[in-house]
Image (cartoon, rainbow, N blue to C red):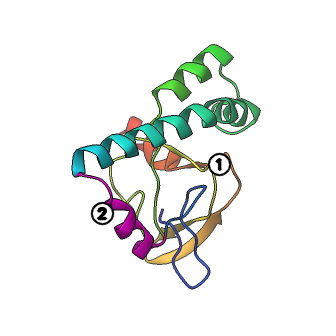
């Protein structure tokens, strides 16, 4: 799975800082302060997303049959990751070690070098096939 690239592609996050703006923004901070700021922003976004993710996971898909307590713990253990257009999220035929939950944006599923489907609905799982296939190998 990868974030689609192209003229109309958007990053998988709620806001966007253009590259030139990012460089100017980063120049205002030393590396340690910038790293702390990034951690804090991601932590705050994660806290805001937790109730939403709990509802999404409980409402359908792979995790809908599990208890709300299990889903709550699962969401607490999740890491928030942001991806840029064209960035590979999971590589084909790699051992599945994690599953992704789409919050916003669009993900193309590529098999044998061809796009086989896109996922763009918030709450959809990505990488679940590899994760479950790895469990049975």
Prevalent SS, magenta region: helix
Q: Mark 2: few, some, or many residues within 10 Å (few <14, many ≥20)?
A: few
Disc number for residue 76: none
User: Disc 2 marks which residue?
Assistant: 27
Choose the circle earlier in sequence order: 1 or 2: 2
Foreground residue, 62 or 35? 35
- Identify the secondary structure beneath mark 2: helix
Q: Which x, y percent locates residue 55?
A: 72, 31
The residue sitting at 47% across, 35% down in the picture is 43
Identity of the residue drawn at 61% across and 64% down: 106
Residue 30 at x, y percent in the picture: 24, 52
Q: Residue furthest bottom?
A: 7
Q: Within the image, what quadrant is residue 107 found in?
A: bottom right
Q: Is residue 54 above or below residue 36?
A: above
Which residues make up the magenta segment?
18-30
Residue bearing mark 1: 124
| Of the pair 120 and 109, the residue shown nearer to us | 120
Question: Does the magenta segment cover residue 21?
Answer: yes
Residue 136 seen by the camera: no
Residue 12, quarter of picture = bottom right
**As displayed, is residue 48 above or below residue 26?**
above
Whether residue 126 is visible, yes or no, is yes
Q: Is residue 100 above or below residue 13?
A: above
Which x, y percent locates residue 136? Answer: 40, 36
Name the residue: 40% across, 66% down.
22
Q: Tell me the residue at 67%/34% (across/down).
A: 57
- Is residue 89 located in the magenta-colored stretch of the structure? no
- In front of the other: 82 or 65: 82
Q: Is residue 26 left or right of residue 67?
A: left
Point out the residue furthest to the front here: 28
Mark 1 and mark 2: span between their CA atoms? 37 Å
> Going by the image, does 123 lie left or right of 21?
right
């Amino acid at each position: 799975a990868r974030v689609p690239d192209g003229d109309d592609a958007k990053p998988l996050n709620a806001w966007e800082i253009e590259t030139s703006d990012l460089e100017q923004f980063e120049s205002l901070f030393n590396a340690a302060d910038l790293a702390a700021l990034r951690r804090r922003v991601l932590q705050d976004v994660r806290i805001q997303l937790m109730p939403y993710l709990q509802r999404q996971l409980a409402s359908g898909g792979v995790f809908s049959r599990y208890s709300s307590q299990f889903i709550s713990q699962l969401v607490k253990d999740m890491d928030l990751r942001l991806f840029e257009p064209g960035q590979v999220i999971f590589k084909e035929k790699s051992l599945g070690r994690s599953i992704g939950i789409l919050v916003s944006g669009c993900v193309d599923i590529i098999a044998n070098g061809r796009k086989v489907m896109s996922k763009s609905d918030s709450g959809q799982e990505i990488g679940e096939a590899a994760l479950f296939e790895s469990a049975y190998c």
